[in-house]
Amino acid sequence: MFKWIHRFGSAPFVYRLAGALSPWVGMACLILLCAGIYIGLVVAPSDYEQGESYRIIYVHVPAAILSMFVYVVMAIASAIFLIWRLKLADVVAQASAPIGASFTFLALVTGSLWGKPMWGTWWIWDGRLTSELLLLFLYFGYMALRAAIEQPQSAARAAAVLAVVGVINIPIIHYSVEWWSTLHQPATISKMGESSMHPSMKRPLFMMIFGFQLLYAYVLLIRMRTGILQREARTSWVAQLPEVARD
Amino acid sequence: MTELANFFHMGGYAWYVWPSMAITFVVLLANVWFSKRQFKSVLRETATRSKALAQKHAQRRSNKTTEQSS
Amino acid sequence: MRCIFQREWSVAMRNPGQWVNPLLFFIVVVTLFPLGVGPSPQTLSTIAPGVLWVSALLAVLLSLGALFDADYSDGTLEQLALSGQSLPVIVLAKVLVHWLLSGMPLLLMSPVLGLLLNLPSQAIPVLMVSLLLGTLSLSLIGAIGAALTVGLNQAGVLLSLLVLPLSVPVLIFGSSAVAAAAGDFAASGQLLALLALLILALSLAPLMASLALRNGVSGGT
């Protein structure tokens, strides 16, 4: 079976599959995000403690969840690439990095915009925000290492090792930062009573999380097609593609 | 009308809620836009390269045939 | 293992800069803080654990940049990789030698710098133990970064970007151990956490670094 996966031939299959899937994924994502943000901003009731400001969770929490999720996907793909030398896994990892970094950035900015009315300052060294910041550095490191090594195959393997090392470290970093922040400010305000959220507030949140996931999938599909094209530019199947052969 | 104004007012948190939504919109859109643009440019590059390659092959082939005929 | 160790040791001893420079860097950086923050003993003793730890971290990581470079450029690394000896063991030996030459002097110098920063004297044993456990972990983590960036131009900045986020847990537990001891609290929890990190780094870092090195040596082939 691995022989089958190994075969060069799977690249054209994935390329075409991604092309066929991406419009549908994009459409579903658009619908879900629009519905989610409408229900979240208009229909859902306001929170009795935080007033209307809580509505930032509809973009903050999905971005934060996805920022971790994308890193895990990247690390798993990197491990697959290292173990079975599957080129497509590297395509997935490479395509994921900028998306994950942008979600991390988003989580930081919206977290800070939420922190201002909640804590009175734009930035607080709270456990979650700090580990999110470190995650952003990990993404930057991954992309910088990839950019620094000229030989593409060598860059791919080095970046894969880094992603695996990073994912082993993420839980350690997260817990140590969490421990550190409780040490320095015993009375941390929890940003949301996760368990106490009303179902009518939770539903749009889940829609937004799923919508963000679909957006990741959509952009990933496009980036994967780009990556495959770049890697296989000299092969005959690429030359025979209708969009390439056509003038 | 007041309902709409209330909605935009966001209970006094308009300055925090709306920028969050705006930046999210911008970042998500930029993700889609840049990846599409990159795909198109790589596609164009590949097309020109493969065409040049095909031309070179054709030329070589025709050169060979002329050599053989002469 | 022992002959690799001896070889590394004799090579390193020929180049005193390798162990003098990190030590000087450590001393100079620590000296800059009172000049930047002000000489008030109160302030200094509050920031001392963090300053000592951050400076030690930077000194270790900056000195690690060239860990594999000499062996890479003269081809020794390639031969070692092909020699059939286990590469993780070689990496471990190199890291240990490097630590003995750069981490150990920091450790021995730290009490003096602690006193300069007005660190309470009961915190000094904890400072030394935490540096012992912590700088070893940092050397191991840094070795991964050095292996990833081997043979690259301007590897130093890139190495810091890669390794600094990974070294955050060590920094947190190390400096908080010292801070706890300075405030007359027990620091055993933090020291145990540092020990756990060290064991984890000992078991994983040589493997990861050798994986990266093999890639760096084989280049694109």
Image: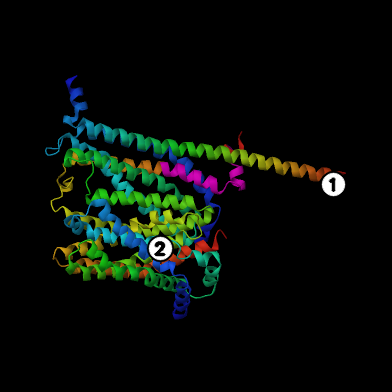
Residue A150: percent from left, percent from top? 53, 52
Labelled pair 2, 1 in contact (Cβ < 8 Å): no
| Quadrant showing the C terminus of chain A | top right
Subunit ID for the residue under disc 1: B
Q: Would residue C16 appear left or right of C166 to someone viewing this image? A: right
Quadrant of residue A23 within the rendered picture? top left
Residue nearest the observer in this picture, A144 or B55? A144
Residue nearest the observer in this picture, C212 or B30? C212
As drawn, which residue projects farthest toward the right?
B70
Residue C88: percent from left, percent from top? 44, 71
Residue B68, label in figure? 1
Residue A149 is a magenta residue: no
Residue C133: percent from left, percent from top? 29, 69
Q: Would residue A167 appear left or right of A4 to someone viewing this image? A: left
Residue C64, label in figure? none
Mark nearer the viewer, 2 or 1: 2
- SS at badge 1: helix
Q: Residue at x 43, y 65 (%)?
A: C209
Residue named by callout 2: C63
- SS at badge 2: helix
State whether the magenta stretch is mostly helix, strand or loop: helix
Q: What's drawn in magenta, residue-wise? A: A219-242
The disc labelled 2 sits on which kind of residue?
A: Ser
What crowding class fits label 1: few (fewer than 14 Cα within 10 Å), some (14-19), or many (20 or more)? few
Q: CA distance from mark 2 to mark 1?
A: 66 Å
Residue nearest the observer in this picture, C108 or A205? C108
